[in-house]
Image (cartoon, grey):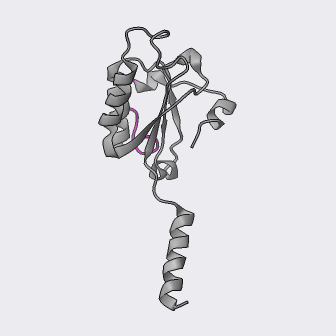
């Protein structure tokens, strides 16, 4: 193996260990009672999800999961920090009762501003903060 190959392999290993920078991740609960017409009639759940994905754009990643196990506070959204936000002290923020389009707009604006650890939540999002058990918090898929 040449020195160039060893240097290239070493750099690749270092990058793999460090991991690529991860964006802000927005996890949207859908499928149980969150996101259903039965629990929240008149809310366009699919439209809100697509609106959030579009508004967040390349600033973050939006994903849907089946259930976050906090059904009493549906619709639930978790905003996880980017790797830079986590390094700055940001931690995942759980939001409950996310039912209005204005909340979707505020979440998207927060993600575009850097999310947890890098920017304060805009508007009235601080009123949507919910506390969940460690069991639920640790069960969030990566």
The reply to whether residue 122 is in sight is no
Q: Residue at x 38, y 31 (%)?
A: 107
x, y (%) of residue 42? Answer: 37, 9
Instruction: Say above or below: 31 vs 17.
Output: above
Which quarter of the image is occupied by the N terminus?
bottom right
Which quarter of the image is occupied by the C terminus?
top right
Taking depth in this image into account, of 66 and 18 the one nearest to the observer is 66
Q: Residue at x 48, y 52 (%)?
A: 83
The reply to whether residue 89 is in sight is yes
Q: Residue at x 46, y 41 (%)?
A: 25
In screen coordinates, is 70 left or right of 8?
right
The quarter holding residue 70 reads: top right
Residue at the far bottom: name it.
2
Residue at the far right: name it.
135
Q: Is residue 121 magenta?
A: yes
- In the rendered picture of this protein, how many numbered marks are placed on residues? 0
In screen coordinates, is 82 left or right of 13?
left
In screen coordinates, is 11 left or right of 135?
left
Magenta residues span 115-124
x, y (%) of residue 132? Answer: 62, 27
x, y (%) of residue 15? Answer: 50, 68
The quarter holding residue 139 reads: top right
Instruction: Say above or below: 72 vs 80.
Output: above
Q: Main secondary structure of the magenta part?
A: loop
In screen coordinates, is 117 left or right of 69?
left
Taking depth in this image into account, of 53 and 73 the one nearest to the observer is 53
x, y (%) of residue 109? Answer: 32, 35
Q: Is residue 118 magenta?
A: yes
């Amino acid at each position: 193996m040449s020195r160039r190959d060893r240097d290239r392999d070493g750099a690749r290993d270092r990058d793999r260990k460090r991991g690529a920078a991860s964006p802000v991740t927005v996890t949207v609960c859908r499928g149980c009672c969150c996101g259903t017409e039965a629990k929240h009639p008149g809310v366009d759940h699919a439209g809100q999800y697509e609106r959030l994905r579009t508004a967040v754009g390349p600033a973050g990643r939006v994903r849907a999961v089946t259930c976050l196990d906090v059904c009493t506070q549906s619709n639930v959204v978790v905003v996880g920090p980017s790797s830079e936000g986590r390094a700055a002290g940001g931690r995942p923020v759980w939001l409950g009762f996310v039912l209005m389009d204005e909340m979707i707009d505020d979440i998207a604006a927060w993600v575009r501003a850097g999310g947890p650890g890098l920017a304060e939540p805009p508007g009235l999002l601080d009123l949507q903060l919910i506390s969940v058990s460690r069991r639920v918090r640790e069960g969030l898929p990566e």
